[in-house]
Image (cartoon, grey):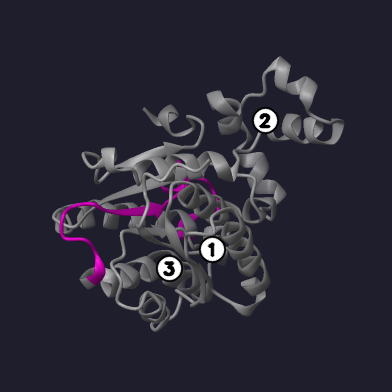
Amino acid sequence: MSNQILKDKLAIVTGASRGIGEAIAHNLASKGCSIILNHSSPRSSSACSSVQASLSSQYPSQTFLVVQADLGTLDGPLQLVAACGGKQIDIIINNSGVSGNEFLPSVTMAQFERQYNINVRGPLLLIQAALELLPNDRSGRIINLSSISSSMGFIGQSVYGGTKAALEAMTRTWARELADRATVNAVNPGPIDTRMYQGTEDWFKEHIRPAMEMTPVLRVTDGEKGALDREISEEVQKAGGRRGLPEEVAGVVGSLCLPEMGFCTGQVVCANGGMRFQLG
């Protein structure tokens, strides 16, 4: 049985076709939300439609609309908000993002522009486009998906880490500017078992191994080791710990959307197993 605490709420989830975005959509739907499921390109159309079909089957009384809009373009955010048909937008999850690791001498302007356009400008333009449709009673919720990379100083992440730091800075500003409309928070996942992280270079995974080993919740217990098959167990041992699950990040995001979280704003909330607190 679903928990209807967010019944009659409308949410936008960007990058909803897979990974963390898909998990967030399922979490919010289970709480009663209707959702605009955004994806950026025709390549993601089938995957996003599958998410829509799954949600519609489980929650037939709610509405789930798939909208293709490239948030890396100037028009994409406007197109996404227009799809709401003028309805109040109660929740916005800025999840869509791209990553890329490159050592400083090899960073190109094309890499810079792509990541900043999608990870920073996209959320800015989306919130700007949605302003008139946000609630006026502080019940709105805006959650920005940042990353542990914003504060860890990982090598090769001059650009990606910078985009997430910028997103966290905007989170704090929006929390003040939109205080009468919505709470605004960020969530900073660590290494999560998604297609994006699976495609990360081996040298980068080796670089963050010490951080993985020091992260409390990423350590695999003896009981968990027995439940892992040999291939997964060897991968975890090589990496220095397990990856987080999209559902674990979605749980944090979904909690921030609850009515009783109205006193939490301008924060960067941990979704990284405790990797961040190593910095003090």
Q: Which mark is residue 240?
A: 2
Place of residue 38 in the rendered image (x, y in percent of width and height, measured from the top left): 50, 69
- Magenta stretch: includes residue 138: yes
Badge 2: residue crowd in 10 Å (few <14, some 14–19, many ≥20): many
Residue at the image point whose x is 30% and y is 71% from the top: 87
**Residues under labels 2 and 3: Cα distance?**
30 Å
**Residues under labels 1 and 3: Cα distance?**
9 Å
Q: Nearer the viewer, residue 110 or 191?
A: 191
Q: Amino acid at mark 3?
A: Tyr
Q: Read off the magenta span.
A: 133-159
- Magenta stretch: includes residue 248: no
Q: Which mark is residue 116?
A: 3
The reply to whether dot 1 and dot 3 touch (C-beta < 8 Å) is no
Specify the quadrant of the image occupied by residue 191: top right
Question: Relative to residue 278, is residue 218 drawn left or right?
Answer: right
Place of residue 33 in the rendered image (x, y in percent of width and height, measured from the top left): 42, 55
